[in-house]
Structure formats: C-alpha cells, structure tokens
Image (tube, grey):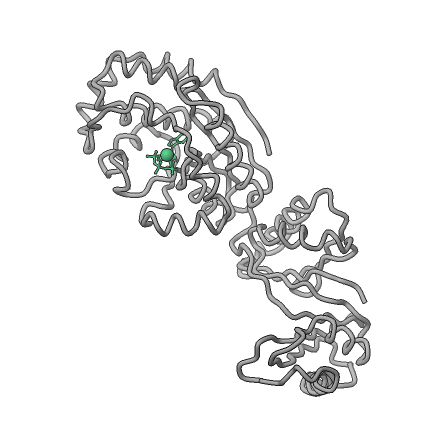
Amino acid sequence: MEKVVIIRYAEIHLKGKNRGYFERVFAANMEKSLKGIRHEIRRRSGRYLVENFAEEDENKIVKKLSKVFGVHSLSVGLKVPSEMNEIFIAAREVSDKSGTFKVETHRADKKFYMNSPQISAEIGGRLLDDNKNLKVDVHNPDFVINIDVREDGSTLVFNKFIKCADGMPVGTAGRGLLLLSGGIDSPVAGHMIAKRGMKIDCLHFHSYPYTNMQARQKVMDLAKILSEYTCGIKVTVISVKHIQEEIHKNCNGAYMVTLLRRFMMRLAEMLAKKDGDQCIITGESLGQVASQTIEGMTSSNSVVESMPVLRPLCGFDKNEIIERSRDIGAYDVSIRPYEDCCTVFLPDYPIIKPKMADVLAEEAKLDVQGLLDEAFATAEVTEF
Ligand code: ATP
Ligand code: MG
C-alpha cells in the first residue's frame, strides 16, 4: 500500500492541437514547484500521479501543487494492487470513522473480474460490517470512497477532493510586467493574469528615504507569495525619489499623482521592452481612488506606446478584491501599514479629472527624458 497524490487538471484538456505543449509546460511547472522534495510525477490516462515521496512531505506537496495553475483538484490516496482484499484495506484506511457514505468505482481495467457496481457494493458491505458507526446514503453522503481500478493492475482509493488553483499553466500565455505596490490590489491583479497562463515579472517604485525599508520588504514578501503561483518571479525596484522631488519643486502640486503615474508607466514600458514583457498590468479599479478615474487612466495610458495595459480589477468592488486577496494569502501582508511612494508629497486636493492639455503643460516644466534615464539606472533586481 503506497501513498500517492492524484492530480486532476483543469482547462488544459480543452486545447485540442496544442495539448502536448500545454501539458509539457504544466508538468514542468509542477516539477518546479516540488523542487527539492523527493518525488516522482507520472502521467496516467488524463491524470498525474505523484509517487515515491516521504510521508512527512505529504502536506508540503499538497500545499505547493494546489497553487500550480492548471491543477483543478487533488486527492491524497492509496495505491494498491487490484485485488479485492487490498482494495478493502485501503478503503478502510481512507474512510471517515463515522457518518454516511457511498462507494463510487471507476473501472478502466475492463478485464477485472467484477464490474463497477459490484465492486462498490462489495466494498461498501465490507466497510459496514467492519464499522458500526458507518451508514450508507447514496443520495446525500457525508463522504465518498472513490475506487479507481486502473489498467496497469493497480487501484487508487481516495476520499477527499482538495480544490486547487485552476486556470492555465503559467508560461503558455506570454509574459507581462506587473506594477506591484504594497497594497491589496496589485498582487490580486497579478494573480488573475498569471492564472490565465501569463508569466509575470514585477516592477516596484520606491522613494527611499521618504519611504522606508519595511515598505520595500513588504513588497518583496508579496512577490514571494505570488511566486508560489507563478513558478518563480523577478522583481525590479526603481527609485522615483528624484522624479517626485522635481515634480514637487516645479509643478502644480495637484498634479503630483497624475504626473508621477505617467513617469511610472514610461519606466514600466522601458523595462518591459528590455525584459521581453508584452504588456503592463496594474491593480487599478475604476473610481476606487482619485487617480483611478477614466481621465486619470487616459492620462497615464497615453504615454505607453507599444503594448497594452491590462487592468483586470477595473470592474471589481473593493470587497471583492479583498476576498481574493485573502484567498491567495496576500491580505495579511498587504495591510501592513507602511507608506507607498504615491503618498509622498501627496497634495490635499489632487486633480481628479485631469485635462490632457493641463497635464502636458505641467509636464513640460520637467526634463522628462533626463529624469527617466536617471531613474531607470537605479533599477535593482531580486529573484524568487
Ligand atoms: P494597490 O492596492 O495595488 O496599491 P491602490 O488602490 O493603492 O492599489 P494606487 O495607489 O492608485 O491604488 O495604484 C494603482 C496601481 O498602480 C497599483 O495597483 C499598482 O499596479 C500601481 N502602483 C501604485 N504604486 C506603485 C508602486 N509604488 N510601485 C509599483 N506600482 C505601483
Ligand atoms: Mg497603493
């Protein structure tokens, strides 16, 4: 009797002709997530099986695989030779100790001497004889004992289904640059796009020493959380301190955020081009704060020339975003109270609906290209 993890995959099976490619990326991503843990992953008729792992690594394996995009659900089960007594012992092992149950059998091995209903009835009967605290309920059972009689002479027996990340394997839908702040929204935005199969790089702007090192650490911690879903992540950090000082010194203060946003977008496009990212991703949500009006987005969007800016949260309410943030395990880090560079030199009354002509007039007071080059040179890279 051997412990195994059974992996069912999500949308990949839809991808007709490209299926082989999707499955190769998927398998490689699972291997990456289990790096350093002894195991073997094998593909078995529409499933993957993780075998040959140490008992004490079971929880770690389940936790890591549940975050790999493409995994629909997991079960920890037992693999036994296809023989009724062995199957019964395994069923007893995975069974809850009390409650109502039913047995569901899937028989791929059509040469096995009993058919599926016969196997279910026999194992169900033996479980009832063995444990008086169990009762059969075929319509609404507390738990289901699943028996999978396979063609290779082995049978898998399992009880629980663990819901996983779903989505498409990361790396099958291009590469994008996520503007990662320390807030609640941007990690969720990155997670959503990675879930569609995009490989994610991150860019964070800081304003040290106006913002402190804890703020930077917070962003690194968020990137690390994201990296568990994205099979690793690269974070570039750029200082916008001097840009902010120059805006503060030369421009109408009400345009601080509007102008800074345009610098951020230009720097993002510069980095994206250098690193091979095909789009920019932000955590903006329409109307959430003063700078996230359609006019604000028009102003920041218009400096990006060669790629789309994806805003997956645009139509989400804050409470929906918070729920997702909790789901992906980022919320507790996101609410740590450190300042973002956007709050440095923040005016009392920021322009909410900036007119392009006014924005351009304010920006004309600055050496835009000089400031961009200078900021870009401060880039530092960390990889998780
Ligand atoms: P978040 O919760 O992601 O911080 P927010 O509600 O605070 O978002 P803003 O501060 O207006 O909203 O930022 C909007 C988006 O701009 C962020 O989601 C992020 O993608 C990007 N952004 C803001 N500040 C930074 C920063 N310091 N570094 C990188 N990207 C940033
Ligand atoms: Mg923010």
**55 with respect to 196 (left or right):** right
The image quadrant that residue 126 belongs to is: bottom right
Residue at 45 percent of width and 44 percent of height: 331
Q: Nearer the viewer, residue 44 or 183?
A: 183
Query: Residue 384 at what x, y percent from top left?
Result: 60, 34
Q: Is residue 321 above or below residue 293?
A: below
Q: Position of residue 91 (x, y in %)?
A: 73, 75
Counting every numbered tag in the picture gives 0
User: How far across and down, in percent of the image, does residue 213 sit?
Assistant: 49, 23
Q: Describe residue 242's horizontal placement relative to residue 55 as left or right.
A: left
Identify which residue is drawn at 24% across, 38% down: 293
- Can residue 268 be seen? yes
Percent across and percent down for residue 135 are 63, 85
The part of the image, by quadrant, that contains residue 59 is bottom right
Choose between 149 and 162: the one closer to the eye.
162
Q: Tell me: residue 361, above or below residue 315.
A: above
The answer to whether one can see residue 179 in this image is no
Q: The N terminus appears in which quarter of the rendering? A: bottom right
Which residue is found at the position 76% from the left and 62% from the top?
3
Quarter, ligand 2: top left
Q: Does residue 87 appear left or right of residue 213 in this picture?
A: right
